[in-house]
């Protein structure tokens, strides 16, 4: 099988020749997931110009996936605003990290065919897939890949809504614990690192200031994992 290589990028120098295509690590990459400029919170006209310059720098044969993340950037592009970037060939796709499935629906409505819409959160993949998401790029597929592939196939290939809902029910309590009804403590990254360790993959601890889960938090995650179907826990990181 041929696998397309995409790199994740948080900072780009697009003036002159200092850009993605100059560094040896990126020579074999076919595209990049590029987060929008952050911290300064620029106006959107400046951000559009930023991505235009990036397209000029890397050429037309390199995919640019815009990472639309309002939590990290302080703003986001609405689906109707993404239409301009897509129609001009500036971007090839979008990771929609807002989390609401309605953003997938909106993007599919406004953007031209062929623009990839990736669901970029963990709490509404079920409606996002039925709304037309082309894939899932977030944290959950990193710890339960088989589960996530099965859910995607049930929604998009088999189009079996009852079976998809039944499968998602197994994950609902786990997601609700640290996302839906959480104040960000424990952090999702801390939870995911611990789950990987439970599966026998010692991925270490998150970068400071985050750290390990508290003992009572580990017990809660252990209980949530125990409540899931044993096939989810046993096979997701093996097959």
Image (cartoon, rainbow, N blue to C red):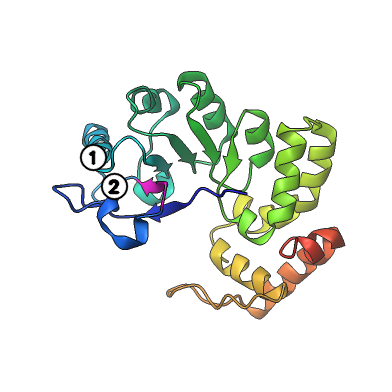
Query: Where is residue 81 drawn, in percent x and y?
Result: 37, 26
Task: Residue 30: say if magenta.
Answer: yes
Indicate whether 13 appears above or below 197.
Answer: above
**Between 46 and 237, the one nearer to me in the picture:** 237
Res 39 visible = no
Q: Residue furthest front?
A: 1
Location of residue 44 (image quadrant): top left
Dot 1 alpha-carbon crowd within 10 angstroms: few under 14, some 14 to 19, many 20 or more: some
**Secondary element at tag 2:** loop
62 left or right of 181 in image? left
**Secondary element at tag 1:** helix
- Total numbered circles: 2
Query: Where is residue 115 drawn, in percent x and y?
Result: 47, 29
Disc 1 + disc 2, Cβ < 8 Å: yes
The residue located at (61%, 67%) in the rendering is 191
- Answer with mark 1 or mark 2, whichever residue precedes in sequence: 2
Disc nearest the viewer among 1 and 2: 1
Q: Residue furthest left?
A: 16
Residue bearing the label numbered 2: 37
Magenta-tinted stretch: 29-35
Indicate whether 31 appears above or below 85.
Answer: below
Residue bearing the label numbered 1: 50
Dot 2 alpha-carbon crowd within 10 angstroms: few under 14, some 14 to 19, many 20 or more: many
The residue located at (55%, 58%) in the rendering is 183
Location of residue 160 (image quadrant): top right
**Between 24 and 211, the one nearer to me in the picture:** 24
Query: Where is residue 66 drawn, in percent x and y?
Result: 39, 40
174 left or right of 208 in image? right
Please tell me whether the stretch drawn in magenta is mainly helix, strand or loop.
strand
Task: Residue 96: say if magenta.
Answer: no
């Amino acid at each position: 099988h041929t696998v397309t290589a995409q790199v994740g990028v948080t900072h780009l120098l697009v003036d002159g020749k200092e850009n993605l295509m100059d560094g040896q690590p990126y020579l074999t990459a076919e595209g990049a997931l590029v987060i929008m400029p952050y911290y300064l919170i620029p106006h959107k006209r400046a951000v559009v110009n930023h991505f235009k310059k990036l397209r000029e720098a890397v050429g037309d044969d390199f995919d640019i996936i815009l990472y639309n993340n309002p939590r990290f950037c302080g703003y986001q592009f609405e689906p109707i605003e993404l239409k301009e970037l897509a129609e001009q060939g500036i971007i090839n796709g979008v990771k929609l990290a807002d989390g609401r499935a309605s953003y997938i629906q909106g993007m599919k409505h406004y953007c031209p065919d062929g623009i990839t819409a990736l669901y970029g959160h963990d709490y509404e993949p079920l409606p996002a897939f039925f709304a037309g998401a082309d894939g899932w790029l977030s944290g959950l597929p990193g710890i339960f890949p088989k589960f996530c592939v099965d859910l995607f196939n049930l929604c998009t290939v088999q189009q079996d809504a009852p079976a998809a809902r039944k499968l998602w029910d197994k994950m609902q309590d786990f997601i609700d614990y640290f996302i839906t009804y959480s104040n960000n403590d424990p952090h999702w990254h801390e939870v995911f690192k611990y789950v990987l360790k439970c599966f026998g993959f010692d991925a270490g601890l998150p970068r400071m200031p985050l750290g390990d889960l508290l003992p009572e938090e580990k017990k809660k995650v252990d209980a949530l994992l125990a409540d899931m179907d044993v096939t989810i826990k046993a096979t997701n990181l093996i097959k």
